[in-house]
Image (tube, rainbow, N blue to C red):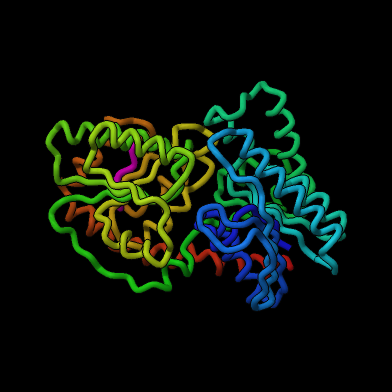
Amino acid sequence: MIVSQYYPPDITAAAFRVRDMVEALNECGHKVTVLTTVPHRVVISGGGGEENSNNVNVHRFKVPKVTTSFLSRIINYLGFATLAVFFTLFKLRGKFDIIIISSPPLFLAITGYILAKLKRAKCIADIRDIWPDSAVAVNVVRQRSAAYRILKAVEMLLYKSSNYIICVSKPMKDYISSHVDSRKISVIYNGISKDITSNPLPEIKNKGGIKLVYVGNIGKFQGLDILIDAFARLDNEGYTDICLDIIGDGVEYERLLARAEIQGLNSIKFWGPVAREKLNGQLADADVFFLQLIDEPILEKTIPSKLFDYLYYNKPIIAGIKGEGSDIIRHLNCGIVYKPNDLEELLLALKIIKNNYNHYERASSTNREYLLQHFNRKRNFKEYFMKIL
């Protein structure tokens, strides 16, 4: 059984990671049951229900919609965590050998603990981000508050009650190892998956200007106000041949869109969420990719999953990140890493790549080869499950 708040056709990085996990288990000969929610960022008919195909049973629960308020997010997470327990207790018959919990949301730690006891199963925790400290980084939770202490206790329950732990980077493993035995922790990086590799890859050459593209979540962790500020400066300085596409959705989308419209930034286009089958062409049409995580120590322990998508297209990357993600870009010499949140460094990076585009494009020509060799996520899941199951 896999319990995950996100699962396709939801178009989130978490959903695609869990999908690859399900397919890896299925190809290893295991029957899989997925407990999840009605997708957040796409519309499907109905309000939940059951789907069955290829030895995979998916049960979807309708939970209250997340708005910009922290309370709505808590209600959404708690609703799913509770429904998963009651559904398993009263409707889901049969034995399970393994319960896999995908976190965040952190409340699924309690769900996993209860379900593992109910089904007498081993529990695997798949940790994608460190909570509650990530919530502290964006001022959603205060570190000295009662809420933080409660969430911290839930985090420790997740680590200590799990038989095995998977995480997405070496610094994250080091952090978790400070709380539990490192021998039960494995790193399975995010990486490339069939959503991109199954589509034909058009080769589109730079036409003289620079199209910067950001795709992914538009939330507080990304700090995308820096893009609005940067393009306002570029407009004032007469850089009319640099434009920006922002593709995706999130709690900051409407506010950032309004900022761009108020400032009359015609060089920025907001696309909203785009289906995977259409996204391929837009990514291939990019000249440079952008990503950033705000400058908080806890975020240095993860690698933005969109970095792996970007690498597939053999284009330069401008990244305001630290940790293993920045190490990959520097190793490949495929772009410029700047200090997160630093507007002047971002502007300098944009101008350097614009003036030396052919150099950075040639340097990025091996990105895809490196990605396919080292970061095939489903293959890595299969190797892991064949070892422990």
Placement of the C terminus among the 4 image quadrants: bottom right
Q: Residue at x 46, y 63 (%)?
A: 192
* Residue 335 falls within the magenta-colored stretch: yes
Q: Is residue 345 visible?
A: no
Q: Is residue 164 visible?
A: yes
Q: Position of residue 374 (x, y in %)?
A: 47, 63
Placement of the N terminus among the 4 image quadrants: bottom right
Which quadrant of the figure has residue 383?
bottom right
Q: Residue at x 61, y 41 (%)?
A: 130
Residue found at the very far front of the displayed protein: 46
Image height check: is 264 above or below 359?
A: above
Image height check: is 143 above or below 275?
A: above
> Considering depth in this image, is 373 or 138 the residue closer to the camera?
138
* Residue 130 falls within the magenta-colored stretch: no
Q: Position of residue 72 (x, y in %)?
A: 62, 37
Q: Is residue 234 left or right of residue 311?
A: left
* Bounds of the magenta segment: 334-338
Which quadrant of the figure has residue 201?
bottom left
Q: Residue at x 55, y 39 (%)?
A: 67
